[in-house]
Each structure stands twice: as structure tokens, then as C-alpha cells.
Amino acid sequence: MENHDQQIEQAYSKMAQLCSRSEQCSADIRKKILAYEIVDEIVDEIIEKLIEEKYIDDERYARAYVNDKFKFNKWGRVKMRYYLHQKGLSDATIEKGLEKIDDEKYVKLLVKTMKDKAKTIKKKDKFTKMGQIIRYTQSRGFEPELIHRHMNEVLD
């Protein structure tokens, strides 16, 4: 029995260390604890304790994730929402993270992404160019309606 308690304490302290080094979400931590072959009820207890002690905060994680993906990866909301969903975060938590994006900066990034892509397209046919720009910016995670709304700022 002592060994079991030691295992739990060891898992807890390793996860606490990990969480203090970088932002983690509860789903990722759950996967890591399960690797220790600890039963689900105890995994829940460990996660609750990490949340109580503020090592894990899914909203804080979502905000940090959105901030990083926007600033460094230049992703749109669609792509961020998809990946946060894959992490098992709730829609409400995801939306709280996404609302931190400044709309003006978001549109500026979209237009810049579209202009940068337009410069790389050799074909001069307007519709071919538009199609390539639309596909590219959608793959970066931008909303189709926003792409179409700002297309005239890109094409001459």
C-alpha cells in the first residue's frame, strides 16, 4: 500500500513541476498521469489538487495558447479553436481564450497574410489568384467570411 501512495505523491510532484515550467491543460496532464498506470479516481484527485493549487487552469492555458499561436504562428481563430478542442477543452473555455484576440490586430494579420501570399503567386488571372489566397488563408485558420470581406484590400 505504501508503494501506491508513494507512486501517487511522485506523480503529483512531477506534474506540479511540469505545470510550473510551462502552461498545461488538464487533458494533457491526465494523459501523462495515466502513463503511471494510476486508476482513474486517483487521477481525478491528483488533477483536482493541481487545479486547487493553481498549477492547472484551463482558461489560463487557453489564453496562453491563443496568444502564442496568434503572435508566433500567425494562426486564425478556426485553427486555434480546432486544436484547443482536440485538447479536450470546453467550448466556453476555448471562447474565453479566443476573446483575448484584438479584432483590429486580427484583421491586420489576415490582410498581411493575404498580401504576403498574393506576392508569391505567379499567375496573373484574378480568379486563380483569389482561389489560392482563399485556400492558403483558410489553411492558416482564418474565417471564410472575413477572407472574402477583405479580399478587395489585397487584389488591385
Image: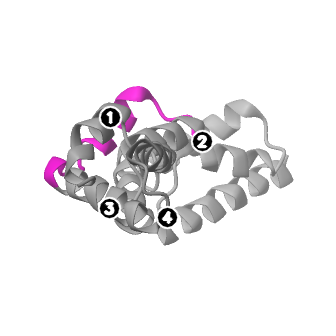
Secondary-structure class at tag 2: helix
Report how far apart the C-alphas of labels 4 and 3 lie in the structure: 13 Å
Name the mark on residue 95.
1
Q: Which residue is mark 2?
A: 27
Magenta-highlighted residues: 87-104
Of label 1 and label 3, which has the lower sequence position? 1
Give whichever of discs 4 and 3 has the lower sequence position. Answer: 3
Which is more N-terminal, label 2 or label 1?
2
Residue at 78% across, 55% down: 7
> Where residue 62 sits: x, y (%)?
40, 47
Residue pictured at 31% horizontal, 43% vertical: 98
Residue 144, given in percent of the width and then of the height, sits at 37, 34
Kindly indicate whether the residue at mark 2 contacts the one at mark 1 (C-beta within 8 angstroms).
no
* Label 1 to label 4: alpha-carbon separation: 38 Å
Q: Picture coordinates of residue 49 (x, y %)? A: 51, 45
Inter-mark Cα distance, 2 to 4: 44 Å
| Residue that carries the numbered disc 4 in the rendered image | 122
Q: Are marks 1 and 4 in contact (CB under 8 Å)?
A: no
Dot 3 surroundings within 10 Å: few (below 14), some, or many (20 or more)? some
Q: Which residue is mark 3?
A: 115
Amino acid on which the number 3 mark rests in the picture: Lys
**Residue 65 placement, left or right of 95:** right
Q: Is residue 51 magenta?
A: no
